[in-house]
Amino acid sequence: MKALRYVAVGQAPEVVEIPIPTPGPGQVLLKVTAGGVCHSDDYVMSLPEKDYLEQGYPLPMTLGHEGAGIVHEIGEGVDSTLKVGDAVAVYGPWGCGRCHNCSEGKENYCTNAAAEGIRPPGLGSQGSMAEYMIVDNARHLVPLGDLDPVKNVSLTDAGLTPYHAIKRSLPKLGAGTVAVVIGTGGLGHVGIQILKALSGATVIALDVSDEKLKLATHVGADHVVISDADAARKIRDLTGGLGANAVFDFVGAKPTIALAQSIAAVEADLTVVGIGGGSLEYGFGSIAYDVAVRIPYWGSRSELIEVLDLARAGKIDVEVQEYSLDDGPKAYADLAASTIRGRAVIVP
């Protein structure tokens, strides 16, 4: 089968031929229908060799932590209602299934995963950017039903991650409140739709790209602001000087975190979702009173089901650009060049 793999540190991923894997006990083999491209992949491939190997990433590694497919073969001992031919989405943050968090479906916060070497597909285990992929356990599959896998595969991360981040802040986002979304690309443009679907907040979207701000307007942002040195003043003007009740930073770079810090209102939530390498200098007088700072990671299995239900209801819609598996390296080049509108999806 063909697979898009990271084969050497510092080099672009390559499309290679490898054997179709065989599911072992408890595993499921999917015939992949779609795999999503994400900045997290780009981050991993940008690591120096020492950091890459110390963090336990294998070489070669099939990319893709957003996956959807058709159940092709079920391994021995799988205790599930799954059947060959079922359309499914892959829940990516794999955990042990035994700890307290996993028992609540919050495998994204598994307390045993690191010690036991359990890694997400495409981020340590072999991923979805291939014609077939192994899923380690049937509980990591969620029914996709009649949802288009190409249009909706990105919801397994680009929908689940903002949903999890936003859901925790909903008590602060009733009518008359303001939410700010920084970065309106792959995750941010879905986050805007989730805010509009679930909250009463006015949504202000920021980006450095006029094209991405057009996308933000298209998906429902009430105001768009170019993210420059004057952005904080403009947001203060839009909020009557009070700032935002919740700020969601989908970039996570030092300048965007500083901006988020400067526009958070009293008792606001400041949630850093992006992995842009920034950090927050946090102390008395450096931020409004009683601001809560959060660094969430992915989301729970039940939240993924809720995200897919939002898609079935027509509440959220991912902008996607399709690439063939052979064009997978170009998808990552386009991602690095910031020319993708919404989310890139590999279609085997």
Image (spheres, rainbow, N blue to C red):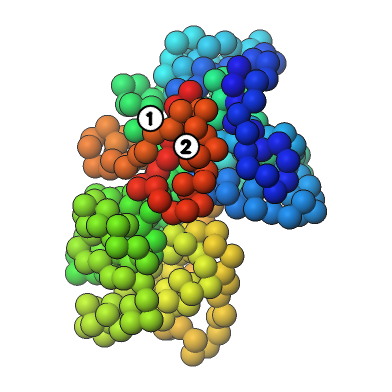
The percent coordinates of residue 21 (x first, y second) are 66, 17
At horizontal 51% and vertical 28% (from top left) the residue drawn is 325
Relative to 198, 33 lies left or right: right
Asked where in the image residue 73 lies, by quadrant, the reply is top right
**Residue that label 1 marks:** 150
Figure label count:
2
Q: CA distance from mark 1 to mark 2?
A: 9 Å
Q: Is residue 188 above or below residue 38?
A: below
65, 302: nearer the viewer = 65
At horizontal 59% and vertical 65% (from top left) the residue drawn is 277
Residue 328 at least partly seen:
yes
* Amino acid type shown at disc 2: Gly
**Residue that label 2 marks:** 36
Residue 181 at least partly seen:
no
Q: Is residue 62 above or below residue 99?
A: above
Q: Is residue 118 above or below residue 167?
A: above
* Amino acid type shown at disc 1: Val
Relative to 198, 336 lies left or right: right
**Quarter of the rendering occupied by the N terminus:** top right
Q: Is residue 46 above or below residue 23?
A: below
15, 168: nearer the viewer = 15
At horizontal 49% and vertical 90% (from top left) the residue drawn is 285
Relative to 303, 211 lies left or right: left
The percent coordinates of residue 244 (x first, y second) are 32, 73
250, 163: nearer the viewer = 250
Q: Please, what secondary structure does the residue beneath circle 2 have?
A: strand
